Amino acid sequence: MLRHVTGWPQGRNRIVVREVSLAARHPYRRLALFGTALVAAGILVAVPLALRATRSGSPTCLGPATVGAVSVGSGIGSGVLALTSVPGAGARVPVSVQVDHGPAAVSALQRLWLISPATGPIALSRSGPSCWSGTVPRGALDDVQIASRPDRAAPALARFVTPEPMRSGAELIGRAQLATRRLKAVREITLGRRSLAVRPTLVDTLYSGTTVASRSAGAVERFAWPGWRDGFEWMTPGIQASVILGDTRIGGRRAVRVAGAVVQTPMWMELDIDPTTGVVLADRMNGANHVMTSRYLPIGG
């Protein structure tokens, strides 16, 4: 469940105000803004700036160029595991498994195993530094687990019961991108932490005009950022193969939940999008030392 926080706890220390320019920083908003805000709150959040800045590696898994690709995923350790497929009319479908910042023992494997009650173990061969791929029967994706060994007793790295039908969220994400560019101002309320094992820090941020103001644990960070609309992850670098998970409600409003892996970045993301306006109402992110949940409240317009 998404925790919606309004107001601020009483008894805070005095506010410390800092002026920071984002003009020369990396365009990914979460890295610059929340890295600064959480450190200002006295919490070290290790976010791989260099990794995202270089977008290391070429896309070896099924991705944005694969028309109709859909993806399901989850956090794994401090990283992300995503299972991507291209549904079609044939009896067999191509699949790929991408593991970013997962356990070192997994990264060294030449094979991963897709295990389904309908088919038994199916080997996926390494096709890149963080990718394993193969072709499987369609029925194998209904209820599937990913494991490092073919026997059913092997601990599952992840298990998915895929939605039926599997539908790509690309069209809805495109609408969200158009709506984001039209925003005049938006307030974001975020709970962020480096892992689920630690308490989250609340960050309250206002994006308006050419500036961003972020408040967390007695500190206010003000940023000059004319391009903040393109700084959201679903804008830059964007979400690759995605899947519609179903309907939900955010603050009494109907929303459609879409999930996908952020392009060439070890991060899995879910978006709750108003299907009428395209406005993103909430998101959740799970990545390497980077677990966040946010609510968005558009202001004006």
Image (tube, rainbow, N blue to C red):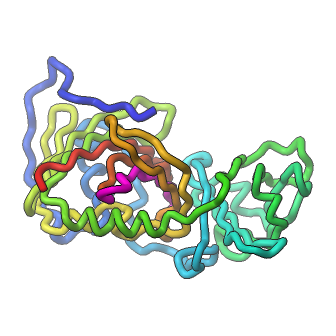
Which picture quadrant has residue 172?
bottom left
Q: Residue 127: x and y, percent? A: 72, 76
Q: Residue 66: x and y, percent? A: 59, 79
Q: Residue 277: x and y, percent? A: 29, 57
Q: Is residue 53 left or right of residue 128?
A: left
- Residue at the front extreme of this rendering: 276
Q: Is residue 30 left or right of residue 58?
A: left
Q: Is 105 drawn above or below residue 254 in the view shown?
A: below
Q: Is residue 123 left or right of residue 42?
A: right
> 165 or 66, which lies in front?
165
* Residue found 41% across the figure and 68% down from its top: 238
> 253 or 59, which lies in front?
253
Q: Is residue 276 magenta?
A: yes
Q: Residue 300: x and y, percent? A: 11, 51
> 260 or 45, which lies in front?
260
Q: Is residue 205 left or right of residue 116?
A: left
User: In the rendered structure, which segment of residues is drawn in magenta?
Assistant: 264-278
> 135 or 132, which lies in front?
135
- Residue at the top extreme of this rendering: 11
Q: Is residue 78 visible?
A: yes
* Residue found 84% across the figure and 71% down from its top: 91
* Residue found 50% across the figure and 63% down from its top: 169
Q: Quadrant of the C terminus?
A: bottom left
Q: Is residue 46 visible?
A: no
Which picture quadrant has residue 83?
bottom right
Q: Is residue 117 magenta?
A: no
